[in-house]
Amino acid sequence: MNPSERPVVIGGGAAGLAACLTLEKAGFSPLLLEGADRLGGRLRTDQLPDGTPVDVGFQVLLTAYPELQRWVDLEVLDSVAFVPGAMIHKGGRWRTLADPRRMPASIGATLCSGIGTWRDRIGILRLVQQSMRGTPESLLDAADEVSTSEFLAARGFSAAFVRDFLRPFFSGIFLDAALSPPAAQFLYTLRMMATGKVIIPVGGMAALVGALEGRLRTTEVRLGAEVQYVQEHALRLADGTEMKTGAIIDTVPRTEGIPWNACFNAVFHCEAPPFGQPIIGLLPEARHVTNLHFMEDVEPSGGKGKLNVTALLRDAQGVEAASMESAVREDLLQVGVDVGPLMWSVTIPRALPRMHSVCSSMRNPRIGSGMYVAGDHTAAPSLDAALRSGRVAAEALIVDSGRAKANG
Ligand SMILES: Cc1cc2nc3c(=O)[nH]c(=O)nc-3n(C[C@H](O)[C@H](O)[C@H](O)COP(=O)(O)OP(=O)(O)OC[C@H]3O[C@@H](n4cnc5c(N)ncnc54)[C@H](O)[C@@H]3O)c2cc1C
């Protein structure tokens, strides 16, 4: 193919990878330009000093994500599933709250947890039912832009249940303490959780990136290729290289105006006994920490004596890792967890785009002649949305190019 006809995908995160895979299916051999020295974008795994893998920002996969199922054989991806529920630290002790439909053995502990009233529990089951109506995509495309927080308040949940469970649980997912994401995103996430498992790949998110990357056949990947300037059918790299191109799918959030939710993630040495099963711990009474998990519960050998903690940052500007470390230590001490030395930490100022409306993918990814956009910032703040946006942009390109529509 003439290089000036070859489609170019900018950014090798989830959206860019899904775009390339979709283009390949339609017979294209795209060029993928990635500014960093690795693919994956925000799906990134680092190593603790002893070699244990740790994701750069704790994140999970929901096996019900339709786009994940499209590209990854979840039967083959080696993973660990979290228990559907949470351990909640309240009033000086850990309490269990589990999904009674899938964890019948935990019904007793859940009923005795003191978290939520009967009305709250029935309310959750009703919400799950509501989230099952229509297709998953139709939930995201709902025009209603009420925030999750307003939506929950209108549903009559007790203030204590919102404070002790709903807010810490979902603020950990959205990385947004105010639960400002639209209710559509909340219902979508609820449906994904109710119909599938919450897993993390063994080896971290790098294993997922490897699974996606491993499917690329005809894409030419160029790492360290930072795109500085883009226009229709042409671009310039940071090293000054000018390129005439075919259509371009840009997955890089270029709008400076996009607000981001930020987080701090750390791993501490910790001698406290783990929960004994892979489950998320929530600290509703803490100031900064939103969730934690004992790494040993997830990976018995490498995770021994390690606590993985996520805290939300209201404003990532000027946040010192050292000050976050002491804030997190203080929070943990208050719940009786005395952690040892810090092993690893990261501050992520641009973790998830803060969006007041979402859609299953950007309604129209075309932004000019032969120019398309994708990325979670164009659709909804999740991996599923990032993958879908990449596919939808590629499908638009394929249709516009006159080639047969990508099959599936
Ligand atoms: C801490 C954290 C927790 C999360 N938790 C979850 C979760 O539990 N569940 C979930 O579904 N989602 C979660 N997410 C969100 C999910 O990881 C993202 O939605 C998804 O990875 C975004 O993919 P993307 O391709 O849109 O963007 P990115 O991953 O940001 O990809 C953009 C790519 O473009 C490259 N790039 C940037 N500028 C240039 C340039 N000028 N030239 C060339 N390349 C460039 C970047 O290096 C990057 O590789 C989480 C994210 C974070 C950070």
Image (cartoon, rainbow, N blue to C red):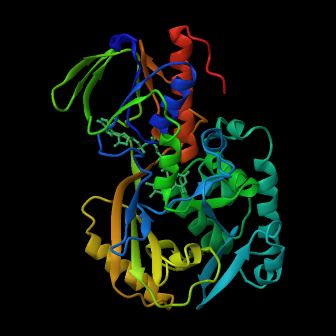
> Which residue: 35% across, 46% down?
38
Q: Is residue 310 visible?
A: yes
Q: Position of residue 170 (x, y in %)?
A: 59, 61
Quadrant containing the C terminus in the rendered view: top right
Give the farthest residue toward the left: 240
161, above or below 358, in the image:
below
x, y (%) of residue 166? 64, 66
Q: Quick one: 288 or 291, which is closer to the camera?
A: 291
Locate residue 299 relative to residue 166 in the image: left or right: left
Q: Which residue does the image show at 68% across and 70% down from the upper left? A: 83
Tell how many labels. 0
Q: Is residue 245 above or below residue 122?
A: above
In this view of the protein, which residue sits in the foreground, 246 or 146? Answer: 246
> Does residue 403 appear left or right of residue 242 in this picture?
right
Which x, y percent locates residue 346?
34, 65
Q: Is residue 364 at least partly visible in the picture?
A: no
Q: From the viewer's side, name the closer residue of 160 and 40.
A: 40
- Which residue shows up at 69% across the image and 49% down it? 64
- Image quadrant holding the N terminus, namely top left
155 with respect to 77 (left or right): right
Which residue is rendered at x = 76% and y = 79% of the image?
A: 110
